Image: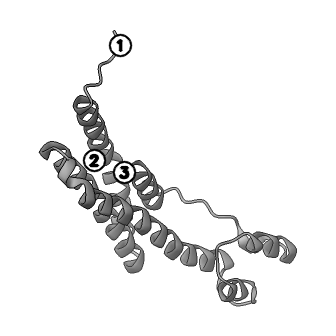
């Protein structure tokens, strides 16, 4: 859950940082791309001179890589819940399901907002992760500690 939530929070964050590829020299760009996850064709397209900003091209390509990555982590979490739900109390299962649903909803909002160029959906997803996910996570932690009979030292 923690890994999936961290990936979702990063994906929907309004603060995304990218290197300024348009200001890089050809050797700097090639050095950067040698360490990039872009595939060979994408690297060639980015290097080729066009009227499109290299940074815009890179941002667009990276969005899809990031979406794939966050989906992988959330899918693993979802499957974990499904496999282990038999061992969860009703209140834990309910909270795990709520945070799972919230993460998927925020990912979808971010993706639709990106495709539709409607940034309010992105902003909403970011706020929902911040405002709704953290209380759910804390509630889950408390329920697990209670179930494990964890006692705070006084």
Location of residue 153 in the rendering, given as x and y in whole percent from the top left corner: 35, 13
CA separation in Å, label 1 and label 2 = 29 Å
Of residues 108 and 73, the one drawn nearer to the viewer in this rendering: 73
Structural crowding at the residue carrying mark 2, measured as other residues with C-alpha within 10 Å and reported as few (<14), some (14–19) or many (≥20): some
55 left or right, relative to 142: right
Of residues 118 and 63, the one drawn nearer to the viewer in this rendering: 63
Location of residue 43 in the rendering, given as x and y in whole percent from the top left corner: 70, 83
Q: Give the label on residue 1, or none.
A: 3
Q: Give the label on residue 20, or none.
A: none
Q: Mark 2: which secondary structure?
A: helix
Q: Nearer the viewer, mark 1 or mark 2?
A: 1
Give the labeled residue for mark 1.
153
Q: Earlier in the sequence, mark 3 or mark 2?
A: 3
Location of residue 60 in the rendering, given as x and y in whole percent from the top left corner: 54, 77
Say if mark 3 contacts mark 2, CB within 8 Å.
no
Q: Mark 3: which secondary structure?
A: loop
Q: Quadrant of residue 121?
A: bottom left
Location of residue 59 in the rendering, given as x and y in whole percent from the top left corner: 58, 73
Q: Give the label on residue 132, or none.
A: 2
Residue beneath the point at 45% across and 71% down? 67
Vertical order, 127 against 141 (above or below): below
Q: Earlier in the sequence, mark 1 or mark 3?
A: 3
Residue beneath the point at 15% across and 43% down? 91
């Amino acid at each position: 859950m923690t890994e999936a939530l961290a990936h979702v929070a990063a994906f929907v964050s309004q603060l995304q940082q990218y290197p300024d590829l348009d200001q890089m020299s050809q050797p700097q760009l090639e050095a950067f791309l040698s360490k990039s996850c872009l595939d060979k064709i994408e690297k060639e397209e980015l290097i080729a001179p066009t009227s499109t900003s290299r940074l815009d091209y890179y941002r667009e390509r990276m969005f899809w890589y990031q979406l794939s990555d966050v989906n992988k982590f959330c899918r693993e979490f979802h499957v974990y819940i499904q496999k282990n739900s038999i061992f969860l109390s009703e209140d834990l299962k309910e909270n795990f399901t709520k945070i799972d649903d919230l993460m998927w909803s925020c990912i979808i909002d971010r993706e639709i907002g990106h495709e539709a160029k409607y940034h309010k959906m992105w902003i909403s997803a970011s706020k929902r992760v911040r405002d709704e996910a953290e209380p759910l996570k804390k509630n889950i932690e408390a329920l697990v500690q209670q179930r494990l009979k964890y006692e705070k030292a006084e």
